[in-house]
Image (spheres, rainbow, N blue to C red):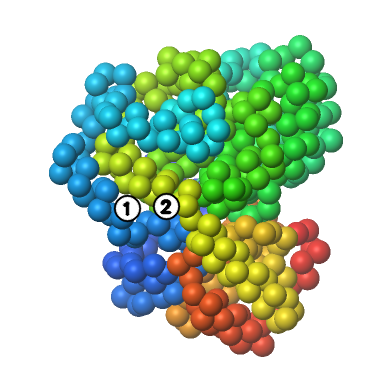
Amino acid sequence: MRADLLQRAAARQQARAEAGLLRRLRSVTATTAPWIVLDGRRLLSFASNDYLGLAGHAQVREALCSAAARWGVGATAAHLLGGHRAPHAELEAALAAWTGRERALLFATGYMANLGVLDALLQSGDVCVQDKLNHASLLDGARLCGAELRRYPHGDVDAAARQLAACPHAAALLASDGVFSMDGDVAPLARLAALAQQQNATLLIDDAHGLGVRGAQGAGSVAQAGLDARQVPILMATLGKALGTQGAFVAGDAVLIDALTQFARAHVYSTAPPPALAAATLAALRLAQQGEHLRARLQARIAQLRSGAAALGLHLLPSDTPIQPLWLGSAVTAQDWSSALEARGFHVPAIRPPTVAQGQARLRIALSAAHGESDVERLLDALGALRQHHAQPAPDAGA
Ligand SMILES: *Cc1c(COP(=O)(O)O)cnc(C)c1O
């Protein structure tokens, strides 16, 4: 007999609940970074990707409102069918200039940008070599386009080299996150670029968590690694992280962008994002470009958290980015720590399977320039108090 799809989905959900891994959607009813009100309680949040504190910035809000007054809310059509408005074009030019590329193309979300690029460039018979910890959208994009997906162990460039060498005649895309979203470490970008060159593969870097945060003027991880558009021909980044708005872009030379305009279905068949959002993002981009003081403040918080955690004997995964994971191993332990922190007034979500591998659950502590020194101090105090009751498991159990 035919399986009932909804019954099967309910059974999967039941299994997830029994494993203690059910996710729960909760509503935030107010925000003033870095504070949120969650289930009626005011919590100090260490969960946001608003690394520079721009999501609520007065100039960004003002840009959104005044552009909405001029352009309305919706773009009313896809980019190719009249939805592409002056603020989109202006933002694309500014993103290209910022990242040192010829052109840039906007997408509604980062998820769609990655699906769009992979679907536009790859076809069956090709190979897509990816870091095992790449963002889900890169993995999903590879599945969608029908290319052979090969995943190498995290950060293992030699393994990537072997995978590319094993199929010397297939057209190949090598893809990696710039900064890994749940680990906070940075990809070996220079070695990946050298490998791509040596193997005639095309390199794509997803710099969702590096843009605005790393490199001179916040131009990102690729700029920080000293790599240019020839070495990293496909640069993707999102606007919903350090820029504090929403959406994503792909930057590269005219050949790439023209091809995406024609063949990236996620771009062609989707309504253009609101023009006012593009205007707000442009304001955020200017603030991020000139945001050395914000990056300095963020770096000070990162250093403060790491040295404080070390003094408490707590193990953070190696990271010099705003993503500072406290490794806990089991999903139950991670959830216990998260709940105990919430009881003390902090929002630090547990990251559990399947977002991370079995046995790799953690607290993902995300820092922001919106955090003051006293905010991090309070978190450290709470972590210290917690440590008295719950030992952190030995990190070498697989971390
Ligand atoms: C957040 C993220 C995305 C997805 O971007 P959205 O705009 O949130 O859809 C893609 N890649 C990485 C590495 C991310 O962290």
Q: Quadrant of residue 128?
A: top right
Q: Residue 269: where, in percent of width, then height? A: 34, 22
Measure the alpha-carbon separation of dots 1 and 2.
9 Å
Q: Is residue 175 left or right of residue 199?
A: left
Q: How far from the left and from the top, in percent, is residue 252? A: 54, 26
Q: Amino acid at mark 2?
A: Leu
Q: Choose the circle earlier in sequence order: 1 or 2.
A: 1
Quadrant of the image containing the C terminus: bottom right
| Nearest the eye: 294 or 108 | 294
Whether the residues at callouts 1 and 2 have beta carbons within 8 Å, the answer is yes
At which x and y percent is residue 99? 54, 36
Residue located 69% across and 67% down the image: 316
- Residue at 65% in and 69% down: 303
Q: Is mark 2 within 8 Å of ligand 1?
A: no
Residue under the image location 41 percent in, 31 percent down: 92
Residue at mark 1: 60
- In the picture, measured across the screen, residue 222 lies left or right of residue 115, that is right
**Image position, residue 67 (x, y; %):** 22, 42
Residue 190 shows in the view = yes
Residue drawn at point x = 58 percent, y = 70 percent: 301
Mark 2 secondary-structure assignment: helix
For disc 2, the marked residue is: 287
Amino acid type of the residue that numbered disc 1 sits on in the rendered structure:
Val
